[in-house]
Image (tube, coloured by chain):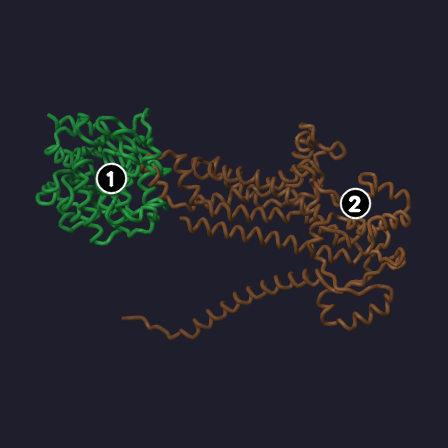
Chain colours: A brown, B green
Amino acid sequence: MSPQLESNLPARHRIGGFWKGIFQFSTIIGIIMLALLLITIINNVTGYVVIGSKVDPQSLAINGVALEDMSKDDLVTVLETNLSSGMIRQMTRENPLEDLTEDELYAIAIEKVVQQEILASWSLIDSIINSDGIHAEAAEMYPDGELQWKTWFTLDFILSSASSDPLNAGVRTALLGSLLVIIITIFVSLPMGVGAAIYLEEYASDNWINRLIKTNITNLAGVPSIIYGMLGLAIFVRVLQPLTSGAMFGVGDPATANGRTILSAGLTLALLILPLIIINAQEAIRAVPDLLRQASYGVGATRWQTIWHHVLPHAIPGILTGAILAVSRAVGETAPLVVVGAATYINFDPSSVFSKFTILPIQIYQWTSRPQAEFRHLASAAILLLLIMLLTLNATAILLRNRYRSQL
Amino acid sequence: MQQRSYYETVTVHNYKEVRMLTSTASLILNNHVQETTTINPSFAMQARDLSVYYGNFRAVKEVNLSIESQKITAIIGPSGCGKSTVIRTFNRMNELVPTARTEGEVYFMGNNIYAPNIDPVEVRRRIGMVFQKPNPFPRSIFENVAWGARINGFKEGIGQPSMQEWVEQCLRKAALWDEVYDKLDQSGLSLSGGQQQRLCIARAIAVKPEVILMDEPASALDPIATLKIEELMHELAAEYTIIVVTHNMQQAARVSDYTAFFSMDEDRAGILVEYDLTKKIFTNPHDPRTEGYITGRYG
């Protein structure tokens, strides 16, 4: 006797279609959220602004020569007549005015004498769809101001250091800080992480101690980053202060030699992403086919030769991908570095790994918490820069992976 | 007399197994009287009371086997009878399996390779291996052959072949040279399965082994590639001792001089049932289990 088979194909297809719809919906939600994020950022990166000046540049003209066409001597005269002697003295402590170039003098004149400021700003979408309204509003509310289109994300923005004046503020300090911190992080965590992964996968025997270690590394990857900040504060800033402040080498800045340095920050982030790198590298090493190891042992290779010549080259794409993803997480980390003591406002470039520092996410946070609307635009521009950095890192990961894959 | 001494050895080991083993032992002894006591350096390899455990499971039980030099010995038997395990203990590859444990001794030209002062790396250099699935390194054909020689201290000198010549020599011995001489810098993985397997053989002989272990070298290949490997084995036997594990009885009958038939006892541990000249095993086996397997009634 054979069983009766019911014709249920339409129902099965319906159920399949239902689930497919759910999966599609989740994907679409994700894409929409990403698009919204990008739109919010770009919305603030460019748009109309009204720029006013405390002093009308035309009133500064000497013998009918406008400020922007002035010679060096005239610019010096303008500065000396319009600025207080105390301010001049402060400015000339390092460089006498006569040593500066024409462009630099002009920039100082605009910043200190004319004192341009932003009276109002609009977002990109506003500026596009409500262009006429903005023109009318600007003419009515700020008759002296000049309405112009301003893009906040410019080369100047990337290259100028932090400033309390939004027109001159840039991210150079934070960018350099971030780059230096991340370089230290990479140089510390990559060799250590890959080394640990090689040991755990290729050398360590399968006993309970090693299993405990492996499990705990996985757990460490899930520890909140602020905890790593506390650890960094306790170990690198406090205990290892002579090392991390540079006092040990006699190179530290005595004014800031307190361990809250780029080195401490880099080491803390290295600690933070070490478990991630180890786990990823372990996965990559485990994915190396055993046949390859056996082939190597079979011709009389030692364990080290097998690892160096066969296991590592085969695992490198995976290791690099994992490492770069971990590093891009470190680039965006804020909390642990707040604890370690990143400065919220500094306007000089880091001179060495023993300098005080700030990093991009902290600069962004600092700008968003300012009351003036202009800083929101700066924050958006900085976020855009951070996103570009992250995308570049991830693209590098993909390129490297494909390159090494094709070599296999 | 000889038979008696073997009997006693077994008794000492495990009284309960005596009855079962006696039949096996006596059959072996009829042909290979030296089996029992002497370790004879004229044999390429000898296993003495070789048992292999994976964790608590005994996969191979008290195997005694002597492999003739410069002959092809085939190991046949049903799946799971420990054939592969046995030949992997012959060059200490099996200890790469984390849970594996070996008891007893394996002698290579009279020396116990499991003695404490023996380096397994040197053992694997002198006892090469070809695996079931072709596994060339993901490198150029040239590098596949050259690498093993290089890491084992290959030196060019007066009266010595250069690396170029040595690679050519090995590839010729592996009957692959004519097919690859113009593309030595291409990846070993670009070759066909049969070519890859011959590349693996070339790689194995490049480190000048004395014994080549082959673990089902043709089971992943098509019939024509299989035939080529078999021809190659015949040629290599002039210079090397070859031990080949195979699923394929026809293959064993075609290529080997000696055949060892493995089976499982009631604990599913692999045992050596019968070991003899291939001709004899396939025409006039002593053990009913061998006969059953050969004729396809069992296994």
x and y percent of residue B41 in the render? 19, 26
Along the horizontal axis of the image, is A108 left or right of A333? right
Distance (Cα) linking label 1 and label 2: 75 Å
Which quadrant of the view contains residue B125?
A: top left
Mark 2 belongs to which subunit? A
B85 over B48 or under it: above or below: below
Q: Is residue B267 visible?
A: no
Please name the amino acid that badge 2 sits on.
Leu
Horizontal relation, residue A341 to residue B266: left or right:
right
Few, some or many residues within 10 Å of mark 2 (<14, 14–19, 20+): few
In the image, residue A1 above or below residue A187: below
Give the numbered dot on residue B169.
Answer: 1
Q: Tag 2's secondary structure?
A: loop
Between B247 and A186, the one nearer to me in the picture: A186
Query: Which of the chains bears the disc numbered 1?
Result: B
Per the rendering, the mark at residue B266 is none
Check the image and name the residue furthest to the top.
B117
Q: At which x and y percent is residue A325? A: 55, 49
Which numbered disc covers residue A100?
Answer: 2
